[in-house]
Image (cartoon, rainbow, N blue to C red):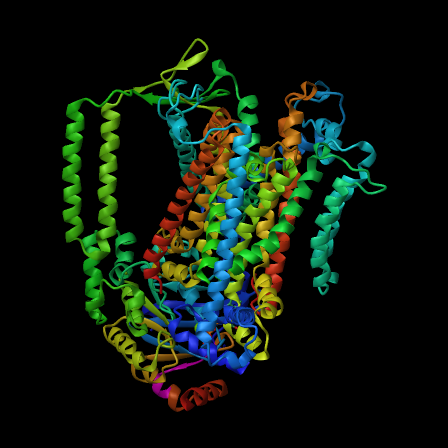
Amino acid sequence: MSGSALVHVSDVCKRYRSQEVLTGVSFQVARGECVVLCGPSGSGKSTLLRCINGLEDWNSGEVTVDGVDIAANAHRRGHIGQLVGMVFQDFNLFPHLTVLDNVALGPRVLLKEPSTKASAIGHELLERVGLSGHTHKYPYELSGGQQQRVAIARALAMRPKVMLFDEPTSALDPEMVKEVLDVMRELAASGMTMICVTHEMGFARNVADRVVFLTDGCVCETGQPGDFFSCPTTPQAVKFLSHVLAR
Amino acid sequence: MGITTDSSSKSVSPGSAVSPLLRRYFGTPGRGLLSVLLATVWAWAAWALLRWAILDATWIAEDRSGCAPGGACWAFVVARIDQFLFGFYPPDEHWRPALILVLPVVLFAVAVSDRFQSQRQMIGAAIVLVPIASLALLVGGVPGMPHVPADKWGGLALTIVIAETSFVASMPFAVFLALARRSQMPVISMLATGFIELWRGLPLVAILFMAVILLPLVLPPGFQIGRVEMAITALTIYSAAYLAEVVRGGLQAVPVGQLRAASALGFGYWRTLAYITLPQALGKVLPGIVNSAIALVKDTSYVMIVGLFDFINIVTAALSDPKWLGSPTEAYLFVAAVYWLVCFGLSRWGRSIEIRSARARGVVRS
Amino acid sequence: MLPQCAEAVQTQPEQPEPAARISVEKGGLMSVAETLESRVEPSSEGRAGGPRIPPRLRRNLGSIFWQGCTLIAVVALLAFLGHNIALNLKARGLASGFDFLSKEAGFAIGFSLIPFTETDTYGRAFIVGLLNTIFVAFVSMILATVLGTIIGVARVSKHPPTAAAALVYVEGLRNIPLLLQVLFWQQLLINGLPGVRQSLSFGGWVFLNNRGLVLPDVSTGALPVPPSLMAAIIAATLIALSIIAFRRAEPSRRRQVTVWGIGALLALEVLLATLTVDWSRPALTGFNFRNGVVLVPEFVALVVALTIYNAAFIAEIVRAGIESVNKGQREAAAALGLPPRLTMRLIVLPQAMRVVIPPLANQYSHLLKASSLATVIGYPDLVNVFLGTTLNQTGRAIEIVTMTMAVYLVLSALVAGFTSWFNAKVALVER
Ligand SMILES: Nc1ncnc2c1ncn2[C@@H]1O[C@H](COP(=O)(O)OP(=O)(O)OP(=O)(O)O)[C@@H](O)[C@H]1O
Ligand SMILES: [Mg+2]
């Protein structure tokens, strides 16, 4: 598996001043694999994702995506944007642009597509996430679930090799969670490489190829979803699962 | 955790993870170039300024020709310092304007020091008393302090007295205007709005011109008004109009619940105002009030329009002294430094109030 | 206290104002009403009078009484002042009326955008002053906005030396009175610059000396007919094309179409102007420049001072605007792959705009008013020419003060009106 691995994270350490947030995280994600990253609050999941697309500096260790060293290329945002797409918990759509422009901005400005082509890409992706009727609305005119789907389309428009999701559904009302998860499920089925931080254990169980469990800034346990949920090996994972599944 | 086997070798060579600080300065070639360039400019500017202002400067001289070329000629400022600070005040009485200069500094020191933070009332009283005392010192007319006519006043002392007096006089006026503007009675609210917007819409220069032209006309015949009074009147009205808007912002920010609670306790309109609304409203906009005070200090320089020899005007007038021709840069730098210290000090104070009140509300900001 | 609360509740449905105002004024109105009651009917039995005069009416009566009093007091004050003015004018033998506007001014104006000689009227002098005010304010506004934006962006730079330089600029300059800066630049321009013969030359087209800034002139003759006709035809076509394109464009593209349309028009005009207009290069002959437009040193000093001073404030406005943009927006842009410069231009600045415009408009209005400092250094702006010279010569104090006030109030109102219009417009795109 490691031969065809797309994302290598090896021994990443990260400190905020004196606080150790990541203490040597290592794992790999193969092409087309969907990995769910879970762990208790404050265990460093968001920080890890932000390191993978170079939004954050780290202190030691190495991250490569498709053979590209992220730290060395962190300042070349245009380059990283085409490797790694990211979906945020609170959507972060650009409020001054229409839905279509939000999606078409990347292709037009960064991929240097002509306007018409960029719009076509936007329309196609919005269609794919089920929002073809909303192209000319502004973000504030959409529901949270719709906004999050736009955010997914926006990230996909850069044709990234891997998609990162940082708790994409936790800012949503329960009835909207499903529509976003459906889009993610469809994406995973289409062969996209994905790393998802989520507390949706149903999604992890049914869609993920592998679960990586993070505590105190390092990978504590990793395994097939079936194994992980039925017989976790570490006490931390047992405790975590008892909390999460009890909800 | 078990996966990390050779962590020692990794931490020795962190590879690409350069120190963030270093990357901040030299992340890209352009950035590195800019760092070097700016550092050079900074160093050069600091060195040039140091040489010109201190190392090569002349502090004492008879006239301009006695000053070394290439350095600052502070001798001009030194020679005229009495006049710049005290105007044409009789030398025997110089202690009075000197005291006027010292009083606000003491007041400021008390206001910022932590020891007196609890004595709000005392500071408030001092803020009202200092201008009155300063004005009294300047005018004189009591035993031990002979009267000094207005045409002898000038320099920094006059600037300070005008700024202090107009500010303190404009405060109650501003509160009154703000309350009137928020009144539910349309006539009163409209009159107040019109009055405020009228003065806010006019340039201070024009207002001062008008004070010179119109005040003698609108006063009953035979009624004289001095130039200092004109200037203080104009600045008071002008400052009150701006302050009124600041105060109104504070009034709007007092939660409705406060007023309901007060009226449930049986407080009437005026009591609610005095004990509940105003203290909260003024507290909230204290930084805004300080900003208005800074603006007023700078605007005081406009009184040269009515022909007063305030700090800037007296320096400008001294520039035409044939003995010292060609010294405007030094003279204006001196004036600028004094104004800068006052305004910057005030603005830091305003900022510290803001931070303190934010902390009190539990919203700590960087 | 219970009846009071009941009344407050009663009032709310018919008062459109927010509840806050009602509560603030309630006590006041109550006490007013009580005062009124005791004045109007001293014999009535206090509270028992309630049923006979309904509370609302009682309050309205009180309110009307006080408003009437205020109005009478204000009118009386104005009448008193007016009376004094009449007496004073009479005592000084001063005439009144606006007829002076058509009289010959008899003074020259050192700098004007339209031709003005001593034989022109005071009315024309008024126009000259007004144009000079608008001109100096407009030029300074544009320069201050450009400089202020650059410094504001530098202020939030992650590159410490840049941020520090911007901070020093802002803190250094906004704490020094504008008047002092105006005087400083005037002194520097007059004493610090070389004389006419040693003018600093910028490429042979622009010259700077102690008599001002010399710019290339355009020949003032009217455009020959064919080019202007051509310009009109092309412009009309462009406008028509733009309108069609605008109609057809998707709503999200419309702004772009508008910008392109206007841009094309401007480009066309500039092109035609450079092609058809005669640019004459300033040339030094004897002791002065020929063929050039001279911007007097007073103008240059004023523009420099206004620009530098206001740029410091605009920088702070821009900084606040940038900082008001949610951090998530920058991250999302970075995650998408936008480099910092594009993030700033495409994502941050457009959003900052919404926060920036109202205080910016305020600053513009401040700048406009501050331009009247022209008087101090002798640039002939409205205050200088009209409130100064014209008033001195004609003595029509009331008329001249009124006209000057009207001009500034109208200009301020325009700025305020624009701000509220803009606010209403951009508020729509708020989350
Ligand atoms: N900008 C920052 N400065 C200082 N400390 C930070 C910063 N961001 C995160 N941390 C710390 O890093 C740790 C990990 O944070 P992170 O956001 O990665 O956790 P998480 O696993 O995503 O938690 P959650 O599930 O609550 O989102 C936390 O203890 C947090 O306090
Ligand atoms: Mg998180």
The answer to which of A87 and C383 lies nearer the viewer is C383
> Residue farthest to the top?
C286
In the rendered image, residue B131, in percent from the top left (x then y), is placed at 70, 48
Q: Residue at x 14, y 33 (%)?
A: C233
The image quadrant of residue B161 is: top right
Which residue corresponds to the image point at 41% horizontal and 15% vertical from the top-left? C289
Q: Nearer the viewer, residue C338 or A75?
A: C338
Q: Is residue A222 within the magenta segment?
A: yes
Q: Is residue C71 above or below residue A170?
A: above
Q: Quadrant of the N terminus of chain C?
A: bottom right
Q: In the rendered image, which quarter contains the C terminus of chain C? A: bottom left
Give the residue at the far right of this rendering.
B144
Q: Nearer the viewer, residue A170 or B90?
A: B90
Q: Which residues are magenta?
A: A219-227
Horizontal and vertical percent for residue A82?
31, 59
Q: Is residue B185 left or right of residue C184?
A: left
Asked whether B66 falls inside the magenta stretch, the response is no
Q: Is residue C342 left or right of residue B161?
A: left
Residue A31 visible, this angle = no
- The quadrant in which residue C250 appears is bottom left
